[in-house]
Amino acid sequence: MSTDNETAREATAAHATVLTKLQKIIPEDMCADLEALDDQALLQRIAQSEANLAENEEAQKADEELQAMKTAMKELKAPYREAAKLQRAIQRYCHELRAARGVV
């Protein structure tokens, strides 16, 4: 049975591991700036980041070239999706026939 101190050390180690992984994505100077923020400022930064994500998503939706490319990709992939759908249906049909015959 772990003690409260062991649990706290494990939690701290887990956070350190996650922070190390995130530091590989976030520029070093930005990590330093974030580390200097107090808890309230961190909450504000989280909200700002969420607003930035929403703005980015809206920009993607408004990008006509991107939307045209997505439509083209969807159309190009359609025959492959249909072929895969057919093969999955065949597999399922075969399983159901075997089950109906009492073979499992």
Image (spheres, rainbow, N blue to C red):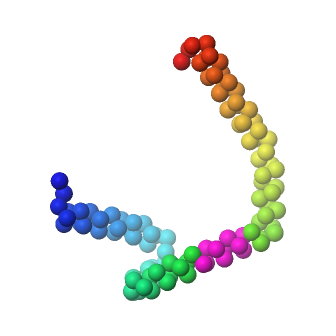
Q: On screen, 89 above or below 49?
A: above
2 or 86, which lies in front? 2
In the rendered structure, does residue 1 fall within the stretch colored magenta? no
Q: Position of residue 91 (x, y in %)?
A: 65, 27
Q: Is residue 33 visible to the viewer in this orientation of the structure?
A: no
In the rendered structure, does residue 59 fall within the stretch colored magenta? yes
98 or 66, which lies in front? 98
Q: Residue visible at 61% across and 73% down? A: 53
Q: Quadrant of the C terminus?
A: top right
Q: Position of residue 39 (x, y in %)?
A: 39, 83
For residue 69, which quarter of the picture?
Answer: bottom right
Residue stretch in magenta: 51-60
Q: Main secondary structure of the magenta part?
A: helix
4 displayed left or right of 59? left
Q: Is residue 75 visible to the viewer in this orientation of the structure?
A: yes
Q: On screen, 74 above or below 20?
A: above
Q: Residue visible at 67% across and 70% down? A: 57
Q: Residue visible at 80% across and 49% down? A: 76
96 displayed left or right of 43? right
82 displayed left or right of 18? right
Q: Position of residue 28 (x, y in %)?
A: 45, 79
Report the number of numbered marks. Answer: 0
73 displayed left or right of 39? right
102 or 5, which lies in front? 102
Q: Position of residue 15 (x, y in %)?
A: 35, 67
